[in-house]
Amino acid sequence: MHIEMNLLFTLGSLMGLLVGGGLLKLVSHLARGRIQFMYAICGGILLGLLLFDILPSTWHLYDLRGVLLGIVAGYIIMLCIDLFLHKQNKEIPPLQALVLLTVAIFFHNVITGITFGITDMHQSASVFAATLLHQVPEGMAIMTVLSIAKIPSTFFLLIIALLSLSLGGSLLIGESVQASSLKL
C-alpha cells in the first residue's frame, strides 16, 4: 500500500507541476504577459489551501496557542531574513534564479516527503489533494523563470521530473524511519 501511495504522490506532484506550467503559459498568452494575473492565481491557490485546509486541520489537532506562536515566530523569522539578506537591489540573472528556485523546491520537497513519510500523513486523501494543489504555483514559478531566462520548455519537463522524484523518494526515506525512534 505504501509503495502505491508513494507512486501516487510522485505522479500527483508531477501532474500539479505540469498543470502549473501549462496554466502559466495559458494565462501568459491570454493576459499578454501581465505578471499580476499569475500572482493572483498563485496567491489564491495558496491562500485557499491555507484558510480551508491547513489552518482548520492544524487548529483541530493542536493547541491554538502553539499554532499562533508558530505563525508569529515564522513571520518574525521571515522579516529578519528579508531585513538582513535582501539589502542589495541587485537583480539575479535568470539562469541563477532558476537554479536557486529548483534547489529550494527540491529541498522543500525532501523535507515535506520525509515528514509525510514519518507521520503517515500521505495516507490521507486531503493531504494528497493539498499537495497536488500546492504544486501548481511551484510549476507556475518554474515556468516563469524558464520563460524569462529564454530556456526551452523541454527543460521544464526535466526539472519537474526531478522535483517529483525528490518528493516520492523522500517519502520512502521517511517511511523507513520509525516515528517512535525520533527523540526531541
Image: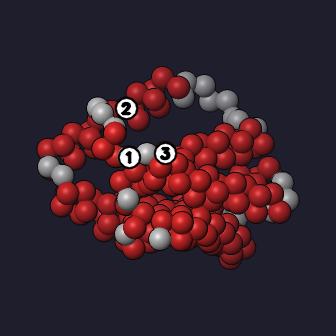
Q: How is the image coloured?
A: secondary structure
Q: Nearer the viewer, residue 171 or 27?
A: 171
Q: Which residue is mark 2?
A: 77
Mark 2 or mark 3, earlier in chain: 2
Residue plotted at (58% across, 68% down): 7
Which one is closest to the eye, mark 2 or mark 3?
3
Residue behind mark 1: 178
Which comes sooner in the sequence, label 2 or label 1?
Answer: 2
In the image, is residue 91 above or below residue 84?
Answer: below
Question: Tags 2 and 3 in contact by the CB under 8 Å rule?
Answer: no
Quadrant where the C terminus is found in the figure: top left
Residue at position x 47%, y 31% in the image: 82
- Nearest the eye: 138 or 113: 113
Say above or below: 182 vs 125.
above
- Give coordinates of residue 163: x percent, y percent: 64, 54
Q: Amino acid at mark 3?
A: Ile
* Rendered residue at 34%/38% (across/down): 182
Above or below — where is 157 with respect to 64? below
Residue bearing the label numbered 3: 111
